[in-house]
Amino acid sequence: MPATVCGDDSEDTGDEDRLYTVQVLRQLADPVLIPLSNNELGQSVPKRDWEIEQNNYQNSPLQAFVRVLSGIGPWLALGTDKSKEGQLRAQYIELARIGIIHSTDPEAGDFMFGEAARDRIVHAHNLAYPLVVARQQLWEPLTDSQKENVVNALKTHRPFEPFPGTWLWFSAIIEAALWELTGEREMEHIERAVESYMGWYIGDGYYTNGATFNWDNYNSYVAQPLMLEVIRICRDQGHPLGDHFEKVKARAFRYAEVLEHMISPEGTFPVIGRSSTYRFATLQHLGYVGARVDWPEELDPGATRAAMTTVIRRMIEAPGTFDNNGWIQPGYVGHQPSTRDRYINTGALYNCTLGLAHLGMPADHPFWTAPRAKWFQQKVWSGEDVASQRAYRE
């Protein structure tokens, strides 16, 4: 499905961009969700030589599923309707729900939540987050026994201590999800994450990853989306931590603006820091705020859509991104084997699906209906007049 590669001043709206992005979602999700619906994911995910050498394969099927689930959750949350896309969503809601049932059922062939190690904190959070985002589609229709299996799977994180830093949000969103879905939680996980990160804010919309500063994109695909979700749940539950919501929202809007400004005129962004093999997951926060919070008034929705679509297209269509069987391969742009971090396996690479959070904005949202336009850096580098730059001050 073609999409315009660069912004322009035409009156074209986002129909083609949305169709293209849905096709990308399907390209990533189908190799994972379809085998899992038949209890065959464990035997379908490739075992690559480097995963065997690193002894890093065991959780690859689990990571592939829950990361895809997290990525498509905002889109599934739109529910079904009579449109072609609404009917397509119905199919994927069913596939996702079957995947949740199979992955958490101890009697199923693709049961994934058995014996746990410390990294279970990471993987269980990717099950918890979409259950909160798409509660009506993924949680409510489950039977009591199926819900019990899911709760048992989520609680497998509890024996382990999260590392100080972004891992705090993994355990926090799990407990916040349990709180919202069942009324039961271990509050210390939530309190520690919120209180730590409120102290790690360094200004202009950015939080450090613990006591030290790291240049990476974990503010986008962990910290800020999960922070907003956790604090929103605290607010809805009447807990004092919910009083932070407006402050973290304002910071989140500034960070979204920075992410848009980081997209070059050609539709690239600086590749800096660990986990860059997650590719356009870097864009998650920019789409998340529009889908789950509100659209930042500082950003032109049509220009931002054009920028994000261009980045995704450049990355997803790069030669070597997928192997001959349609499984994603390590790399930043295409197949670049040396880019993988030691904790990366094939399943982990599906974190890129998080970068499709903007599909959670409905088709009639200004993000999709506004005319395609030049984004900020295109305007700057073509010599157009633009507003003066500023920092965010509280």
Image: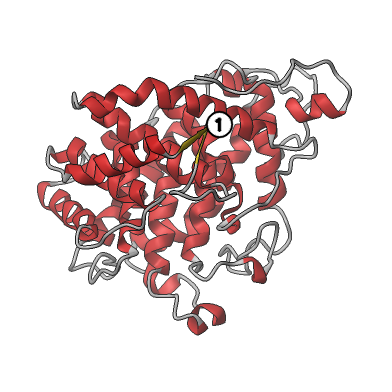
Relative image position of residue 149 (x, y in whole percent): 16, 56
The residue at the far right in this view is 383
82 vs 310, left or right, is left
Q: Is residue 20 above or below residue 31?
A: above
Question: Is residue 68 among what the camera can see?
Answer: yes
Relative image position of residue 40 (x, y in whole percent): 36, 69
Q: Is residue 141 above or below residue 215?
A: above
182 vs 66, left or right, is left
Q: Is residue 136 above or below residue 31?
A: above
Say how the picture is coloured.
secondary structure
Q: Nearer the viewer, residue 71 or 35?
A: 71
How many numbered callouts?
Answer: 1
Q: Residue at x 25, y 39 (%)?
A: 191
129 vs 255, left or right, is left
Q: Residue at x 28, y 44 (%)?
A: 192
Q: What residue does disc 1 label?
A: 255
Among the 4 quarters of the image, the one containing residue 332? bottom right
Q: Residue at x 29, y 22 (%)?
A: 243
Q: Nearer the viewer, residue 94 or 282?
A: 282
Relative image position of residue 26 (x, y in whole percent): 52, 49
Relative image position of residue 151 (x, y in whole percent): 17, 51
Give neighbour class at mark 1: few <14, some 14-19, many 20+ (Cα, 10 Å): many
Among the 4 quarters of the image, the one containing residue 153? bottom left
Question: Is residue 76 among what the camera can see?
Answer: no
**What amino acid is found at the position of numbered circle 1 in the picture?**
Tyr
Q: Quadrant of the N terminus?
A: top right
